[in-house]
Amino acid sequence: MSDTAPSKPFRRLLLTGAAGGLGSVLRERVKAWTDVLRLSDLHDLGAAGDGEEIMCCDLADRAAVLKLCEGVDAVLHFGGISVEDKFEPIMQANILGLHHLYEAVHKAGVKRVIYASSNHVTGFYRTTDVVDADMPLRPDSFYGISKCFGEALSRYYYDRFGIETVCLRIGSSFPAPRAPRMMVTFLSYDDLVELVRCALLTPRVGHTIAFGVSDNATLWVDNRKAAHLGYRPKDSSTPFAALFPATGERPEAGDVTSIYQGGPFILAGPQY
């Protein structure tokens, strides 16, 4: 019997957006699953640590993205713009950049992408609705529109080329909720990592849409159509309830940030 320890599940994983808030969390925790973690971002990533390699890359640069995906087993795509902005920069990073990524993945023979989508693809559903993966998209912003494009593009590359993707409709992933709305959309860092692990290691995922939320007392989403991933959140926003004590005050009748699930994103876009 060999004394050699089993190898990690992957030889090389690519993490884009590695300098961002969630990318920084994943940078430390993904290493347990891969021999080499390739990190990419436009911003400074510091020195490469053990088991890391750094390739800074502009997603709008097609040639650079093609090179970025060479020798990669799977991609964790957390790069791009993650807030509302004017359409042009969102188009470059989140639309053109994502097309470059999927072309590179296809040419490199990569068979799985974990795509950081967003709950803002359905932000114009009301807070009285419960949304599942098959309901029509109702984006609340240019940012949300770009994530709708990403979900559609990834579906095309699965149907046409067999590249599997798990689209993670991430809610609000911070150490703690920052507003009452986030008590519903909260996703703890531990649950984020577990969702990514399930998305990477489930043998067959096809094209899956999964909602990135913890086991919160109130939910606006129904995750049953991603049950095959085996994601079971362990955390909840409930321990933070004291941050937002209940009051008898009610929002004004026309307050769209309380009517719709997208909250402040509804009003965050440029006013043309």
Image (cartoon, rainbow, N blue to C red):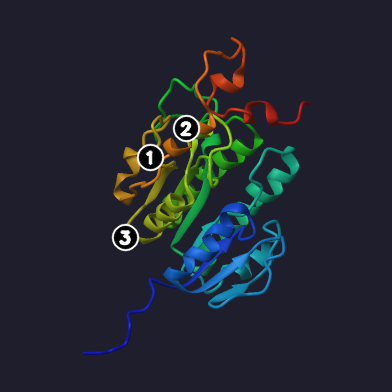
The kind of residue tagged 1 is Asp
Q: Specify the label residue 249 is tagged with.
A: none
N-terminal of the pair, mark 2 or mark 1, is 1
Residue at (42% x, 43% y) in the render? 209
Q: Earlier in the sequence, mark 1 or mark 3?
A: 3
For image coordinates 75% across by 42% down, the residue present is 88
Between disc 1 and disc 3, the foreground one is 1
**Disc 1 to disc 3, C-alpha distance:** 24 Å
Q: Position of residue 130 (x, y in %)?
A: 40, 26
Q: Amino acid at mark 3?
A: Pro
Q: Is residue 229 above or below residue 137?
A: below
Q: Quadrant of residue 148?
A: top right
Residue beneath the point at 33% across and 40% down:
225
Q: Which residue is painted at 63% across and 45% down in the image?
A: 82
On residue 215, the disc is 1
Quarter containing the N terminus: bottom left
Look at label 2 and name its amino acid: Ala
Pointer 3: what residue?
Answer: 203
Residue wearing tag 2: 241
In the displayed orientation, state which residue is furthest to the top: 253
